[in-house]
Amino acid sequence: MRMFDRWRKPISSQPRDVKVALGSSSSLGSFLQTGALGAMTPSGSLSLYEKSTAVSVPINMVVDSFKTVDPILTIRGERVAEHPLLELLQNPSPYFTRIQLLDVLGKDYLITGNAYLAGLGNPGRPPLELQPVSPRNVQITQGSGGLPSQYLVGGDSMVGAFDRQDTKYGVNFIKSPSADMKQIRMYSTKSNSLLEGQSKLLSACREARQHILGSEHNVSLLESGGRLSLVFHFSADMDEQTFEDARQRVLSQYGGASKAGTIGVTAGGADTMDIKEFGVNAKDMDFANLQQMAKQAVALQYQVPLALVTMEASTFNNYTEAKLALYDNAVIPLTMEIMGGLSDWLLPKYGLNPATDMLTFDQDKITALQGRRNREMKIRKDIDVETNNEIRALMSLDPYDGGDEHIHGSEVAVAIDDES
């Protein structure tokens, strides 16, 4: 089995290779289930996501909300309704819709700490297409000052070297003359933090692995009849052939072909048979509580309110507040980070300035936030320190004639002074 692509070669920023003896079933099993390095590599983090609902559920919850946001463009503070950049984001390529592209970027970023996006076409011009690149296929070469000097891409898509070039718009990584690439990365505690981001799963790796291995254990219990192990002891003395025949009958009937060896069979003594259980049962090991703790730990790592992931913490009254907290603490920060990275990379290609112009999103179209926004606008209207047209502008609505007059502004101002 080929574990690493041929183009990979050790660099100082990568952990040392971990060798696993094929004869060691526990070591090999752990490696195949979660990766020997856990969440220290993109492949390890993605493996945790693939195998643990404690990881996938909160991440999917955040990204499922993020990928439906409507990107908008503001130029010097003014919202622009139509622009070639917005058209590109709406139809990034023949193979990805806007929602699919944001889905990939959001999950790559939250799972591995890095999101990579390639632009096809002349690197000095607006991209013809946008193509996400899996973090597991990217190897970063460290240059002077600890800065990345090259992205080396393997796998099946965008294969090749993207070399660093300093342009008037900043640093770019170009595969001349057909494409360039953008990396959006998280914070990292590693010494090479300028190279790549660090997965949030690194802090929750033990909980994620506990969830995976606990699930594997429980499935094993079900497949073996709900016992950790059994010993069938035939007290009667038997010759070797008779004993082997009896052992095979027991294993065939009670163990199953895939679990041969998990049930012990012995012989000797009187003419009776004893069945004894060894180990402890699932209740004693308290897997239910351990699994629940793992889910909560990972959810909190991603700022997902517990009311949305556990029935114990959920009530009808706090569900709405939990949805608002999900957007405030997880969805909106993720949106700002991804849109900020896209702004730095794409705006200069369209002659725009990231210092004054930006890609952002339309909060007014997010259903979960509309109720709170309407309550806030009502309070501001009742206070009457703003005109109706000023409030309508905050709601992205057109002004109307006569909406710029204050009717009770002075009275409200006096009331506020009296209360203070």
Image (tube, rainbow, N blue to C red):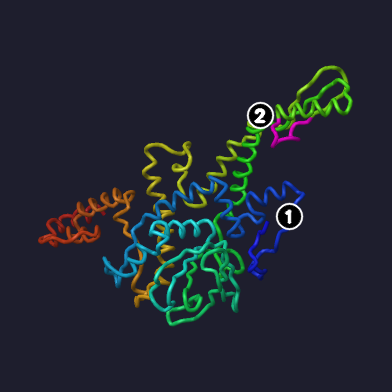
Residue 322 among those drawn in magenta: no
Residue at 62% across / 49% down in the picture? 206
Badge 1 element: loop
Residue underneath mark 2: 225
User: Where does residue 151 sit, x and y in percent of width and height?
Assistant: 55, 71
Q: Position of residue 177 (x, y in %)?
A: 47, 78
Whole-Å distance between the Cαs marked 2 and 1?
A: 31 Å
Secondary element under disc 2, as helix, strand or loop, is: loop
Labels 2 & 1 near each other (Cβ < 8 A)? no
Check disc 2 and give the amino acid type: Gly
Task: Tell me the residue that label 1 is attached to.
Answer: 20
Looking at the image, tell me whether mark 2 or mark 1 is earlier in sequence order: 1
Left or right: 37 in relation to 244: left
In magenta, the rendered stretch is 255-264
Q: In which quarter of the image is the N terminus?
A: bottom right
Residue 42 falls in which quadrant of the image? bottom right
Which residue is nearer to you in this view: 301 or 3? Answer: 3
For the residue pair 46 and 8, the one nearer the viewer reads as: 8
